[in-house]
Amino acid sequence: MNKFRLYFILFCSVFILFSCNKADSVTAVPVRAYDVQYADDIAIIEDYLNTHYLVVEENQDVTISKITDPLVQSSMMSLLDSETYPKLLVKEVEANDITYKVYYLKLRADYETGIAPSKADSVLASYNGTYLSYKTETVNEVPTTTLLATQFEYTPFPSLFLRLDLAVRGWREILPLFRAGQKTDVTGEPTSYTDFGAGVIFIPSGLGYFNVPQAGIPSYSPLVFSFKLYDVKYTDQDQDGILSNDEDLNGDGDFTNDDTDGDGVQNLYDVDDDGDSYLTKNEIKINGLIPTSYSEILDCSGTTIGLKKHLDPTCN
């Protein structure tokens, strides 16, 4: 069992991954067609996968390098659908009227009883972020194009849980496919994590920042993140007493299409889910207490088999 000891740093950090804009002076550049940009993005991502190889350390740190000896260095693309770990997998994501292919590497098997986050939960994760680009130089009158992976942030010792609903779309789609590991707390010692989920995500710009540049990241940049998923915290974004992963009423994993009262505010952000002017957190109380699980919430008849009170505008 591999063990990694995580020392928490007691100061607040600003995470590029979860920011919308890093500086007031940063503005969006003209918008390209999503399908045209995606064609460029997937081409450079697949070029990167075909021309670079992966080395995984015992602690699940990764190094990605350009192949110089194909006889002993196998490309990351050769790991596609491998029967052993690490393995390269693909998830298709529908967005912007096109279907994105999101490649991701799973470095090892998940901890069987570990918690997988929903798209609305919070995660404690270390990560290393780079962006991909081509650089063309002319040497002796011969143009040469080089594929570059430029680091923009490295967070090896996370101190904050980060909300996936505020992350770039690529993270929201892929992190729920991994599980956190085992957590050990010993008085007087740093928290330690073992068997945590570890991987690498390759994100087209349409599921990243697209045409809005960030500090250290040009617009239209495909992103690459290696990460370790240490812990998951169930989140209640609107503080209404219902965990956000219970606000996915149709169970499709998408929280943006659950809006019971049709007011344009998704249930996970709506303090009055049914629009009856009674706060959800007050409607769901039983003997003055908020239930500890969603299944305990009552319907108007006082049972748990009908429409929950906070979703029924005819009662409160």
Image (spheres, grey):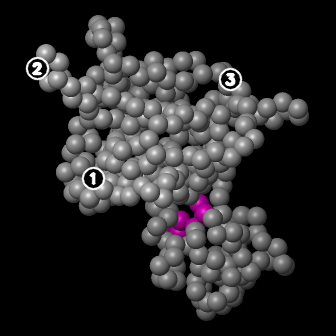
Q: Nearer the viewer, residue 113 or 90?
A: 90
Is 21 on the left-hand or right-hand side of 15? Answer: left
Q: Earlier in the sequence, mark 3 or mark 1?
A: 3
Residue at (34, 8) in percent of width and height: 72
Residue at (41, 43) in percent of width and height: 217
* Residue 234 appears in the rendering: yes
Residue identifier under label 1: 99
Residue 131 is situated, as x and y percent measured from the top left of the image, at: 38, 37
Q: Is residue 12 magenta?
A: no
Q: Are marks 3 and 1 in contact (CB under 8 Å)?
A: no
Q: Amino acid at mark 3?
A: Lys
- Within 10 Å of disc 2 (Cα), the crowding (few <14, some 14-19, many 20+) is few
301 up-or-down from 270: above or below: below
Q: Earlier in the sequence, mark 3 or mark 2?
A: 3
Measure how far apart labels 3 and 2 are at the Cα level: 52 Å
Residue at (47, 37) in percent of width and height: 152
SS of the residue under disc 1: strand
Q: Nearer the viewer, residue 39 or 175?
A: 39
Say which quarter of the image contains residue 245.
Answer: bottom right
The dot on residue 141 is 2
Say which quarter of the image contains residue 302.
Answer: bottom right
Measure how far apart labels 1 and 2 are at the Cα level: 40 Å
- View extreme (bottom): residue: 314
Q: Are marks 3 and 2 in contact (CB under 8 Å)?
A: no
Q: Which residues are magenta?
A: 244-250
Measure how far apart labels 3 and 1 are at the Cα level: 38 Å
Residue at (74, 80) in percent of width and height: 282
Q: Earlier in the sequence, mark 1 or mark 2?
A: 1
- Within 10 Å of disc 3 (Cα), the crowding (few <14, some 14-19, many 20+) is some
Q: Are marks 1 and 2 in contact (CB under 8 Å)?
A: no
Residue identifier under label 3: 3
